[in-house]
Image: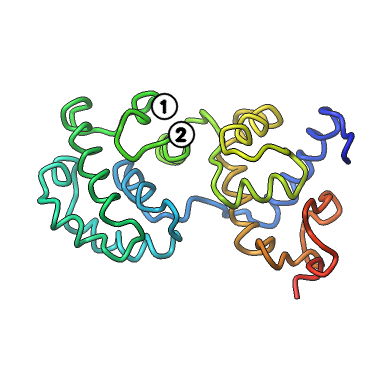
Amino acid sequence: MSRESLTAKRARLGLILVCLRRAYPDAHCELVHRNPLELLVATILSAQCTDRQVNIVTKELFKTYHTARDYAEAPLEDLTESVRRIGFFRNKAKNIRACCQKLVTRHAGEVPMEMESLTSLDGVGRKTANVVLGNAFGINVGVVVDTHVARLSGRIGLTTANTPEKIEKDLMHLLPGEDWTQFSHLLIWHGRRRCSARKPHCAACEIAALCPRKGIGKHAAGGR
């Protein structure tokens, strides 16, 4: 597969998608949210933190803060205390408040639906913007590249890039635009449930026949 043509790689990826969709028909964003603002806040909190931990914190956070203005006008010490259980909580609290202040002053308190507008907000990079656009608005602008997507894309042999920006570019070149958001969910679910970083369970993997297992030693192939 090292000399796999672009056409062949796209065809293989199409089969991978079929298998992953069959394995994870309910794959979706696992950050619990009810609206675009909640998803934006949760995604900012999720950097270098598990979705499970974020969901524990936001369960109470969202009972207190309902609008962008609520966050924008909150005393920083109160907001910081509310997210204390999250890694890098001080910086994230500052970013959330500053982000929501800009939402109030620039966007009438609403989460914008454009990549450029989102990435101009504090604490919002391209990955966060892709999460919000794809899941809150159904807009496929790019591919969310988190640690699971980055790791599995290389392991499956879809890219040799080692930065999120370059990985995303490669994946966008291989996938139809309508699949960009869902592909991220599928890889994330597969990474969490089957293809872990240290002990991938290759023996039971749904896409084993389509995967070159880049970077996986023979000792790890059974996932034991």
Q: Residues within 10 Å of mark 2 (few under 14, many from 20)?
A: many
* Residue type beneath disc 1: Met
Judging from the image, the colouring scheme is rainbow
Q: For residue 133, which quarter of the picture?
A: top left
Q: Position of residue 30 (x, y in %)?
A: 47, 56
Q: Is residue 156 left or right of residue 110?
A: right
Seen in the picture, residue 140 relative to 145 is either above or below; the reply is above
Which label belongs to residue 115? Answer: 1
Question: Comparing marks 2 and 1, which lies closer to the viewer?
Answer: 2
Residue shown at the point (60%, 31%) measured from the top left: 178
Q: Are marks 2 and 1 in contact (CB under 8 Å)?
A: yes
Q: Position of residue 59 (x, y in %)?
A: 29, 62
Q: Position of residue 44 (x, y in %)?
A: 36, 47
* Residue type beneath disc 2: Arg
Which label belongs to residue 126? Answer: 2
Of 167 and 144, which appears nearest the observer? 167
Residue shown at the point (75%, 51%) measured from the top left: 19
What SS does tag 2 mark? helix
